[in-house]
Image (tube, helix red, strand yellow):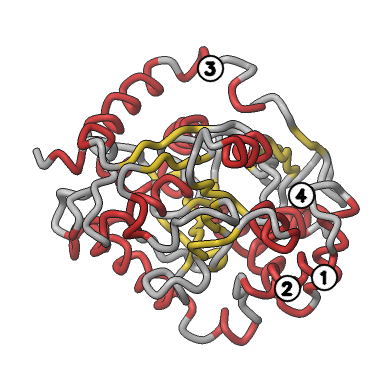
Amino acid sequence: MNMKKTIFKKTAALLLSAVLLTACSISESSSGANDSKSGNKGSSADAKYGKIDIPALDGALCGAPIYVAYENGYFSEEGFDVNLISADFETRKIGLNNGTIPIVNGDFQFFPSIENGIDVKVVDGLHEGCIKFAVNPDSDIKSVEDLKGKKIGVDEIGGTPHQVASLWLENAGISADPSDGEVTFLPFSDGNLEFEALASGEIDVAALWDPLGSIHEKAGDVKIIFDLGTDEYFADHFCCFLYASSKVLDENPEEIAALLRAYRKAQEWIYENPDKAVDLIIDNKYASIEDRDLAIDLVKSYGYPSADEHSSDWDARVEGDVKYFVDGLSKIGYLESDPDQFAKDIYYKVEV
């Protein structure tokens, strides 16, 4: 096996075996997994699909469609009593695999896990952009070519910022495999701790979800060397997809269709009302950002679709982006499957 596959193949396989065997004994303190928010607006005890958990409480500004669907009552309208929870990548994978979590948002970090046996499908696209890589203002790091031998902070190994960084590095000919020693990834459970590590020199680069990177850039505390929304390779492609549990799809596809309708209502509302969406996020403390104008600019940059976009070639765009990232991961050796077949296998068109 190509050494470049280590972090996505050997590690993923070991983690998959471990988490599936110990799914019932996850520590309650794991990544704030007990943090939750119950009772979406308009929720009812006789909701058609009952109570479900949706991971959302991670402080990321780009979780806007989930917050809006919750607060505006779209989940309730579609028959759900939603409990928003905090859950790390492994907890999300477990929930999807056994059907206790019907849907999550995530980037292509799930693709290697699907190849290793996590039973989920890509069912929709959520938004573009939302991840930035920051360095200190006086750093001599200007581009990906300067990252060899550097330490990169991420929220978790295997999470989206980590895998975006890995693909960015590998496309530039720099190995993201820790055994090759060309870069080192250090996980931080809190973005503010990651910035402290950057300022102190413990790490050279901080890979972060919005809004933290943009807040500190505007304050002059950092300079941004990578923006997922504008980078040539990633621009105009989905940052986050929606992944549905295959178990739920098989047993009750209409439940997933109802969830997608709620998400799409939220996306379209954000497209029409980015300022109101930001007020909803700030007022309900879903993300820590005080600069309202900056938050509005960021939300607008995520490319949330209009109703017209949803009714045109939306599904074809989602399927095309799945193939785009499957091809990218296959090219650098992180996927072993035939790219064409794998892309077809992991995408599921839901009749919404």
- Separation (CA) of disc 3 from disc 1: 40 Å
Q: Tell me the number on the disc at residue 297.
A: 2
- Separation (CA) of disc 3 from disc 2: 38 Å
Residue designated by label 1: 293
Q: Nearer the viewer, mark 1 or mark 4?
A: 1
First in sequence, mark 3 or 2: give its number: 3
**Depth check: 131 or 350 in front?**
131
Quadrant, the N terminus: top left
Residue at 48% over, 49% down: 161
Say what secondary structure mark 4 lies in: loop
Q: From the top left corner, tell me how far across and down residue 216 is, in percent.
A: 70, 55
First in sequence, mark 3 or 1: give its number: 3
Q: Amino acid at mark 3?
A: Ile
- Separation (CA) of disc 4 from disc 2: 15 Å
- Separation (CA) of disc 1 from disc 4: 14 Å
Say what secondary structure mark 3 lies in: loop
Q: Amino acid at mark 4?
A: Ala
